[in-house]
């Protein structure tokens, strides 16, 4: 009885205390009201001037480290008196943080650079926490990639494999994506755990679309020589493919870098879906012959050699300095914003080099240069699955549920 | 009316009553509200769930409960992880009791060699972060079948361990068991040290065989400590996240905590909150069993404290072999993990273990550029590392001051009013944070303090929210230590002061604190060390400005900067060990006293 009384008493007290905690009225996010259909006519110069006049600190969150150094270079040159802060945060944490901050009226980011279009659409854009914005200047440079979410940077994850030893893959071994379901390659295909990084999940979701599923079905026949017979729980070839890679002991890793290093050191043929910059990183290692080369596949893989996904640049609903955030975004599409000009410097006084020499990063403005030896985004799009955030948002729960049952 | 007023006045004239009321009010807000909040979260639609539930965010739904308990997903979301959690936790208990209990017996009842050194090293795994042994296991035993490359063990011996040995259930059990073995050693060792030797002497006089003595006297005497160990290890293992994440994920072996993490970060956090509730429920059941057992423990009143004549078992010809085996075990648990971290942080290329591949670059080198594996300066040159190290120390110090002081005061007031409804309520309240999984706890604090509530301003992104959650989360440790120490202290000592008219503050500072000094310091040390190595409690509350060392480690790990993450891990352990041993040297307090009360 005493215990019961004490529990009841405490519950009452907690509820009354909570009731007392008055929640301040937060400004309702205005994101949904922000028109995206009409293109803003404000120019870079106007926005920059307004941003400097506003004078508030410019804060960005980004999944890509270059956006942080870009912010430093931009602010030092164009808005030297204004405070700024750039923070690298992963996509999942960024979704939680931005949603929480805007909902509670806390001043966080003004602009975010974020991947995982499906979660961005459902959790941030539809809720009005962030909104898609571009002006005519951006529209002229980026074209169709302004909608539904504005693409700042394209990244790709391509099938990469070890090469250069007796127990590795040879160049040209991988010609069909169904190789990773082949029992001969059991336990040798790796990817970053789709439940920890959304773009990987979106790729799997995009595979179950009618278009990609049809391509997969044809490729199956090409690889195995017989027609694909679907299991009862697989509505199409996309689902069947996912089921078979899991059943073939796909190795789930916690980061692309770790997977890349494991593959390069592997004493058996190993492969995985990795960001293309791992190719350059591992290239230097071979000189000492400590590890194997990492090579990447291109247009010789039927039907696709991986996937390409955008990092979007989006405005936050309760930005302190929206004008400067927009000016910064416009600048990022310029060649100076993308590659630097040899004179801009970052906070540690190093020269800002932007995306110079980086494989696997392609500006939303396709006229910006790419690294020597890399292919253009246009070419990559032909041989990779391109992230479709709307399809991914619609079917993501279905595919996650499907994986939950087969994992 | 006047009579009632006088009663109220008398009630509040006692400092411990004032303290109890304060604790009741504050803890109700900080502890019970989170519980109510979790329950609420299991019935509403979260923004990431819109596409699966097709209802507006924040509206009522029973989707999560149905999905978890009555759908085709129940098996993979609930029953399999639950079964795995229960199995690994139960077997971890067996491992820790076997290792810790045997070691405790060898130290306190045999003539094993090098006792002083071995006991110091044996408690390392508890001082080190929980993922330490898991990471070391992975570094050591990783095999070609899963990662394509082999670990240090293969490089040394040429033997490739099977996958079940390298990943999944088996290593999770062994690693968790080893992590908690110090608990078993401290609790069982405490009883073995203090037990009345007369019982054994009587048996010897009666010419009882050694084995019979062991099974009929020693085992029953240590039984309460074994049961306490089971409770602690079982709860700890159920709540552990990093070990199953590191060792289970590569082979897709899931337990409740890893499933909870995936749900909360994924597109169905509602299910995650139910899993959190389930874990709290299991912990409450365990606590209930514990309380029943403590009730029964009265029948084991064999520990008198008169331990002058403990009989020492002579190991004879086995002395040296057993000592060497104990030494090797302790090395495996405490020293080799540190060596593997040091080694991994020195490798130019991960996975290649030869001398020509060693470098100090990841400690003291310059950044090498974005197309290399070292895109940041070495950790001793890295301003971010120093900033986070300082932040970690500052935070741990604040949490330790908060939890230690409040825990001591709670212990004092609970014991002084023992038996009253108020005291019992506050005692239960101080223990609730132990039962709430760290990750769920911090998720709730995030939503509680992101906005202004009454007189409390928004704490989002501040140092204060980390300090607050750390203080509340570690309060159970400190208050248990406080209650235990105050129970040992006869109230007459303070009463003497009251009769002499000594004011409360003076009684505390001149009488009680000096007497209980070492236990009180232990009550501060435990929260400090816990906060230094805490990850899951802080990970979603930390923003870029107040990053701590453990979240930096996670950042490096997620980026795949293996050498950096190993180096930072080693740095955390070194800092914790230095602080632990410095405090121990100066004050005589120790972790053992904190755990054992």
Image (tube, coloured by chain):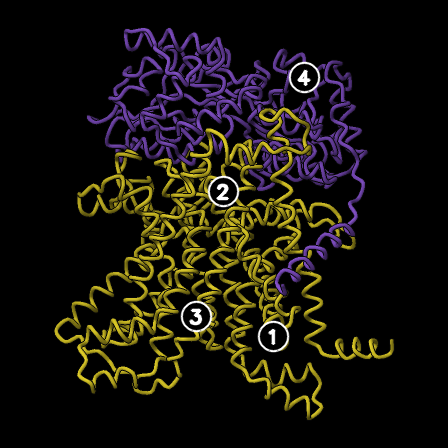
Chain colours: A purple, B yellow
Instruction: Look at mark 1 in the image and give the residue it sits on.
Output: B418
Q: Is residue B38 above or below residue B291?
A: above
Q: Distance between the residues labelled 1 and 3?
A: 19 Å
Residue at the right extreme?
A: B1
Percent x, y of residue B354: 24, 44
Q: Which residue lies under the disc numbered 4?
A: A138
Residue carrying label 2: B555
Left or right side of A9 for B555: left
In the rendering, at what x and y percent does residue A75 appear? 68, 34
Output the chain of dot 1: B
Left/right of residue A112 with respect to residue B239 in the rendered view: right
Q: Measure how far apart labels 4 and 1 are at the Cα level.
A: 71 Å
Numbered circle sitting on residue A242: none
Query: Mark 2 or mark 3: which is in front?
Result: 3
To which chain does the residue with label 3 belong?
B
Q: What is the crowding at mark 3: few (fewer than 14 residues within 10 Å), some, or many (at least 20)?
A: few
Disc 4 packing (10 Å; few <14; some 14–19; many ≥20): many
Can you say which quadrant of the picture contains the C terminus of chain A?
Answer: top left
Judging by the rendered image, the residue that carries numbered circle 3 is: B296
Element on which disc 1 rests: loop
- N-terminal of the pair, mark 2 or mark 3, is 3
Q: Looking at the image, which is closer to me, B146 or B252?
A: B252
2 or 1: tag closer to the N-terminus: 1
Q: What element carries label 4?
A: helix
Q: Do labels 2 and 4 share a chain?
A: no
Separation of disc 3 and disc 4 at Cα? Answer: 75 Å
Q: How crowded is mark 1: few (under 14 residues within 10 Å), some or many (20 or more)?
A: some
Say which of B37 and B157 sits in front. B37
Q: Residue at x 59, y 17 (%)?
A: A390
């Amino acid at each position: 009885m005493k215990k019961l009384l004490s529990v009841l008493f405490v519950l009452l007290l907690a509820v009354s205390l909570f009731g007392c905690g008055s929640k301040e009225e937060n400004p309702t996010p205005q994101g949904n009201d922000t028109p995206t259909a009409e293109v803003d006519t404000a120019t870079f110069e106007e926005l920059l001037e307004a941003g400097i006049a506003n004078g508030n600190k410019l804060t960005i969150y980004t999944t890509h480290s270059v956006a942080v150094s870009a912010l430093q270079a931009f602010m030092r040159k164009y808005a030297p008196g204004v405070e700024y802060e750039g923070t690298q945060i992963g996509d999942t944490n960024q979704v939680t943080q931005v949603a929480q901050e805007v909902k509670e009226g806390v001043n966080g980011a003004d602009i975010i650079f974020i991947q995982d279009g499906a979660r961005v659409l459902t959790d941030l854009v539809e809720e009005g926490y962030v909104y898609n914005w571009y002006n005519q200047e951006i529209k002229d440079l980026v074209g169709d990639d302004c909608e539904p979410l504005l693409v700042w940077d394209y990244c790709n994850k391509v099938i990469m494999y070890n090469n250069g030893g007796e127990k590795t893959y040879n160049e040209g071994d991988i010609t069909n994506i169904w190789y990773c379901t082949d029992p001969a390659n059991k336990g040798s295909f790796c990817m970053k755990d789709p439940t920890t990084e959304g773009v990987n999940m979106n790729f799997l979701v995009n595979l179950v679309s009618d278009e990609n599923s049809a391509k997969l079905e044809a490729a199956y026949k090409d690889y195995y020589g017989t027609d694909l017979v679907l299991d009862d729980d697989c509505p199409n070839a996309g689902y069947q493919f996912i089921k078979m890679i899991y059943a073939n002991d796909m190795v789930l890793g916690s980061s692309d870098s770790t997977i890349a290093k494991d593959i390069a050191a592997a004493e058996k043929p190993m492969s995985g879906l990795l960001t293309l910059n791992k190719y350059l990183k591992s290239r230097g290692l071979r000189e000492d012959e400590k590890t194997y080369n990492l090579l990447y596949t291109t247009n010789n893989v039927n039907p696709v050699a991986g996937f390409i996904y955008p990092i979007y640049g989006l405005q936050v609903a309760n930005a302190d300095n929206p004008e400067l955030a927009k000016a910064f975004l416009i600048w990022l599409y310029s060649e100076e914003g993308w590659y630097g000009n040899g004179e801009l410097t970052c906070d540690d006084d190093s020269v800002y080099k932007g995306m110079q020499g980086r494989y696997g990063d392609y500006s939303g403005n396709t006229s910006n240069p790419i690294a020597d030896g890399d292919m253009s985004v246009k070419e990559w799009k032909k041989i990779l699955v391109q992230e479709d955030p709307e399809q991914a948002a619609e079917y993501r729960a279905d595919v996650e549920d499907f994986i939950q049952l087969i994992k | 009316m006047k009579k009632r007023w006088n009663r109220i006045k008398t009630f509040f004239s006692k400092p411990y009553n004032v303290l109890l009321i304060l604790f009741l009010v504050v803890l109700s807000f900080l502890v019970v509200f989170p519980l109510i909040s979790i329950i609420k979260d299991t019935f509403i639609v979260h923004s990431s769930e819109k596409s699966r539930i097709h209802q507006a965010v924040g509206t009522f739904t029973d989707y999560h409960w149905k999905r978890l308990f009555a759908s085709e997903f129940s098996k993979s979301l609930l029953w399999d992880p639950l079964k795995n959690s229960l199995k690994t936790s139960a077997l971890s208990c067996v491992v820790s009791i076997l290792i810790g209990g045997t070691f405790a017996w060898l130290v306190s009842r045999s003539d094993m060699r090098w006792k002083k050194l071995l006991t110091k090293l044996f408690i390392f795994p508890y001082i080190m972060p929980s993922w330490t042994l898991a990471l070391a296991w992975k570094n050591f035993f990783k095999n070609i079948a899963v990662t394509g490359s082999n670990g240090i063990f293969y490089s040394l011996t040429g033997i490739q361990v099977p996958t079940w040995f390298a990943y999944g259930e088996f290593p999770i059990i062994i690693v968790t068991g080893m992590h908690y073995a110090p608990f078993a050693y401290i609790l069982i060792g405490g009883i073995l040290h203090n037990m009345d030797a007369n019982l054994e002497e009587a048996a010897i006089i009666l010419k009882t065989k050694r084995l019979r003595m062991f099974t009929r006297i020693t085992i029953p005497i240590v039984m309460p400590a074994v049961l306490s160990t089971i409770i602690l290890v079982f709860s700890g293992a159920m709540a552990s996240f990093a070990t199953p994440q590191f060792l289970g994920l590569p082979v897709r072996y899931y337990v409740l905590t890893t499933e909870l993490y995936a749900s909360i970060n994924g597109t169905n956090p509602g299910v995650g909150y139910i899993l959190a509730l389930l874990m709290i429920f299991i912990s409450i059941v365990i606590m209930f069993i514990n309380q029943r057992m403590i009730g029964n423990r009265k029948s084991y009143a064999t520990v008198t404290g008169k331990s002058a004549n403990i009989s020492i078992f002579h190991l004879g010809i086995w002395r040296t072999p057993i000592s060497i085996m104990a030494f090797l075990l302790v090395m495996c648990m405490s020293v080799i993990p540190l060596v593997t971290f040091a080694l991994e942080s020195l490798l130019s290329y991960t996975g290649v273990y030869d001398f020509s591949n060693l470098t100090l670059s990841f400690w003291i080198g310059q950044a090498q550029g974005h197309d290399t594996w070292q895109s940041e300066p070495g950790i001793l040159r890295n301003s971010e590392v120093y900033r986070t190290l300082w932040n970690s120390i500052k935070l741990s110090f604040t949490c330790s001051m908060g939890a230690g002081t409040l825990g001591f005061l709670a212990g004092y007031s609970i014991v002084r009013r023992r038996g009253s409804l108020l005291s019992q309520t506050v005692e239960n309240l101080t223990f609730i944070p132990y039962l709430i999984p760290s990750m769920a706890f911090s998720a709730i604090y995030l939503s509680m303090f992101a906005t202004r509530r009454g007189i409390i301003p928004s704490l989002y992104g501040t140092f204060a929210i980390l300090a607050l959650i750390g203080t509340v989360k570690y309060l159970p440790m400190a208050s248990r230590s406080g209650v235990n120490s105050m129970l040992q202290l006869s109230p007459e000592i303070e009463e003497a002061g009251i009769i002499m008219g000594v004011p409360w503050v003076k009684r505390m500072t001149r009488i009680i604190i000096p007497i209980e000094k070492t236990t009180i310091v232990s009550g501060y040390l435990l929260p400090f060390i816990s906060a230094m190595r805490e990850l899951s409690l802080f990970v979603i509350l930390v923003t870029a400005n107040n990053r701590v060392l453990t979240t930096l480690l996670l950042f490096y790990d997620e980026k795949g900067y293996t050498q950096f993450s190993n180096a930072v891990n080693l740095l955390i352990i070194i800092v914790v060990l230095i602080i632990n041993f410095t405090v121990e040297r100066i004050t005589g307090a120790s972790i053992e006293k904190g755990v054992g009360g």
